[in-house]
Amino acid sequence: MKKLIAGIALFGTFALASAQTITFDKTTFDYGTIKPSSDGIRFFTVTNTGDKPLILSNVKASCGCTTPEFSQDPIMPGKSAKIKVGYNTAINGGFNKMIEVFSNDPANSRSVIYIKGNVDPNAPDPKPLTPAELKAKAKEEKKAAKLAKKAAAAK
């Protein structure tokens, strides 16, 4: 009986080890204090640290002021994808929003990421972006738009 239990435990450990695994670069993005109508778009990076394709089946925001965009294309082992999250910065006041990420990760089929911050008309003006930061941001937005377009075409 002990051998049977040990065998089942070993098989279960192996089964979990050889699967798709979702990992985030961060689970909370803090906007800090920003002015109304500031750029509300942020990105979370999702990485598949498993050895089978990871599929994001749905990404849902806790309210209509937050809009996530994602691709349903498989994320191959060792590869990453972006979840684009937009917040409506025309709404003054503090915010703490939850975004649910559903995937085929057998150990974590529902993950939760957060955005938080404060929209304040008296916030200081944001620091201007450097040319390198502008280029990186444009590249990131272009890639996210391409993924969103691909996801929309797949529906």
Image: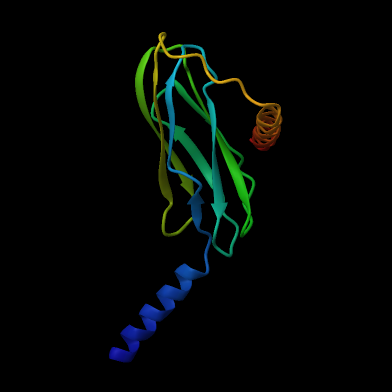
Instruction: State which quarter of the image contains the N terminus.
Output: bottom left
Count up the numbered dots.
0
Outermost residue toward the left? 1
Give the left or right position of residue 84, taking residue 62 as reference: right
Using residue 18 as the reference point, say whether residue 118 is left or right of it: left
The answer to which of 66 and 115 lies nearer the viewer is 115
Q: Nearer the viewer, residue 128 or 48?
A: 128
Could you tell me residue 38's position as x and y percent? 52, 16
**Quadrant in the rendering for residue 144:** top right
Residue drawn at the location 62% of the way across and 24% of the way down: 129
Residue 12 visible to the viewer: yes
From the top left corner, tell me how far across and down residue 96 is, in percent. Answer: 35, 28
Residue under the image location 50 percent in, 53 percent down? 22
**Residue 29 rendering spot, x and y as whole percentages:** 45, 35
Query: Compared to 13, does 112 lie above or below?
Result: above
**Which residue is depicted at the point 42% across and 54% down?**
108
Picture quadrant of residue 106: bottom left
By what rule are the colours in the image chosen?
rainbow
Q: Position of residue 141 (x, y in %)?
A: 66, 30
Q: In what quadrant of the picture does the C terminus appear?
A: top right
Please identify the quarter of the rendering in which residue 128 is found.
Answer: top right
In this rendering, the answer to whether 47 lies above or below 43 is below
Whether residue 104 is visible to the viewer of this picture, yes or no, is no
Q: Residue furthest top?
A: 121
